[in-house]
Amino acid sequence: MAIYRLYTGDDGQSHIEETSLAEHPELGEAQAAQSIMFREWPPGHFIDWHPAPRRQYIISLRGEIEIGLGDGTTFRYGPGDARLVEDTTGQGHTTRVVGNAPSLTAVIPLAN
């Protein structure tokens, strides 16, 4: 399992960094959450440029998701990958379901 952070940089663009519990032990502490929901999208589902609606964790359970950034780079996430999504301002990112399987994710909005 890997943990990634998707955030807005000083340049107004979304960026991704891989992190770990060793580097950020606070991620292993309890965090206030609003709710949990599950989202399933079919292969090929695409969402054009958008910032995140709120700070949230998204954990991939099945299938593969590709996140696109403004500089043209893409990152793929599969089962077990967790993303702390904090790019709530700026251009945001794109989201695409890649591969032949639907994607199933757990979405956990954070209370703060």
Image (tube, helix red, strand yellow):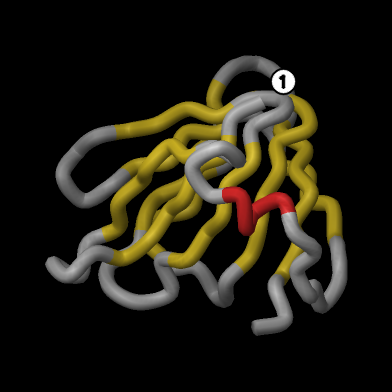
Q: Which residue shows up at 43% across the image and 53% down it?
A: 6
Q: Nearer the viewer, residue 98 or 33?
A: 33
32 lies above or below 106: below
Where is the C terminus found, in terms of image quarters?
Answer: bottom right
Q: Residue at x 82, y 78 (%)?
A: 34
Residue indicated by mark 1: 101
Residue 68 in the image: state x and y as whole percent.
Answer: 34, 42
Name the residue rendered at 49%, 42% in the picture. 23
* 26 horizontally vs 31: left or right: left
Q: Position of residue 57 (x, y in %)?
A: 66, 56
Mark 1: secondary structure: loop
Residues 80 and 97: in front is 80
- Quadrant for residue 82, please give it: top right
Bin the neighbour count of mark 1 within 10 Å (Cα to Cα): few under 14, some 14-19, many 20 and up.
Answer: some
In the image, what residue type sits under mark 1?
A: Ala
Q: On the picture, is 112 further left or further right than 51?
A: right
User: Residue 52, relative to residue 43: is it above or below?
Assistant: below
Horizontally, residue 75 falls left or right of residue 99, namely: left
Compare residues 27 and 2 and report the one nearer the observer.
Answer: 27
Percent across and percent down for residue 54 are 57, 76
Q: Quadrant of the N terminus?
A: top right
* Residue at the far top in the pictured view: 100
85 lies above or below 95 = below
Of 34 and 21, nearer the camera is 21
Where does residue 47 sit, x and y in percent of width and height?
A: 48, 53
